[in-house]
Each structure stands twice: as C-alpha cells, then as structure tokens.
Image (cartoon, rainbow, N blue to C red):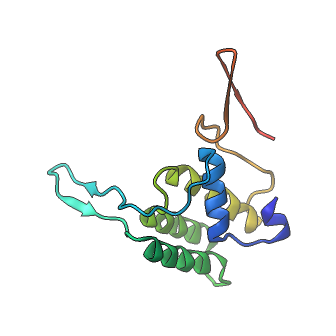
Amino acid sequence: KQLESKPFITTNLCIDIMQRIKENTSSVRTTPGTTLSNTNGDVIYTPPSGEDVIREKLSNFEKFINEDDSLDPLIKMALMHYQFEAIHPFSDGNGRTGRILLLLYLKMENLLDVPAIYLSEYIILIRKKRQLFYVIS
C-alpha cells in the first residue's frame, strides 16, 4: 500500500519490511556482518560495517532504484538485488526482505499486475492448534 501513495522504495521501507518479517523493532545492524568464505576457508566477502557506512550504502541503493534511467527493468532488478544483499543491512531477514523488494520493484515498474507474495514460512506465519496458516491478505 505504501507504493500506491508514494511510488518509491526507500531505506525506511526496507526497514519496515524487515521489522514486519521479524516481528520486532530492530533496524540497520550495528554489529559486523557475517563474512563469506570459500571451500578453503578463505574469506571472499566481508559486508560493510558500521551503521553510518551501511546507511550511506542504503542511501546509494535507494537513489539507484528510484532514478529514472535507460536500464532494462529486469537488469536493474538483478543489480538492485545484488546490491541489497551485498550491503546485508540487517542482522537477520536480508534475503526475505530482498525478495519482497524484488516484487515491489516489479509492481512499481508495472511489470507485475497482481499482488504476489512468496509463500515462505518466514514471511508471515501463524501457528494455531498445531496447524500452519499463511496469511495472504
């Protein structure tokens, strides 16, 4: 609904999505992120550290998504997903938030006609009487 009134993907929207997924009030991480290592144990990627640095990178991410350019929207979508996951702004929920951002971007670019949601138990899950119900409204 936020995209209907303001068709921009913002840092605050990313934080709001993550908070809804995690059902908490956490924000941009202030602790070092998890490094990626290859099979030899060599560190091949270290995400940015420091809240100010992460927020600056999110600001660049926001500008990239919302600028009017000649990039094919599907190419831009792939680049924005890579950029968001490389920033890895949250302690948890980055992948799920990133996948929701993909859908929002497709909707924003009018490439997705109907609302869609990933049926992932991590997005919105309710436990009731030992049964799992997905909330899709």
| Residue 49 appears in the picture as rendered | yes
Q: Nearer the viewer, residue 115 or 43?
A: 43
Residue at (64, 15) in percent of width and height: 130
| Residue 71 appears in the picture as rendered | no
| Residue 49 horizontal/vertical position (percent) | 37, 69
Residue at (80, 56) in percent of width and height: 113
Residue at (48, 76) in percent of width and height: 57
The residue positioned farthest toward the left in the image shown:
40
Placement of 70 over or under 131, stated as above or below: below
Placement of 121 over or under 105, stated as above or below: above
| Residue 75 horizontal/vertical position (percent) | 55, 70
| Residue 115 horizontal/vertical position (percent) | 78, 50
Image mark count: 0
Q: Nearer the viewer, residue 52 or 122?
A: 52
Identify the image quadrant of residue 100: bottom right
The residue positioned farthest toward the right in the image shown:
5
Residue at (24, 62) in percent of width and height: 44
Placement of 127 over or under 87, stated as above or below: above
Using residue 106 as the reference point, say whether residue 40 is left or right of it: left
Quadrant in which the N terminus appears:
bottom right
The residue positioned farthest toward the top in the image shown:
129
Using residue 1 as the reference point, say whether residue 22 is left or right of it: left
Quadrant in which the C terminus appears:
top right
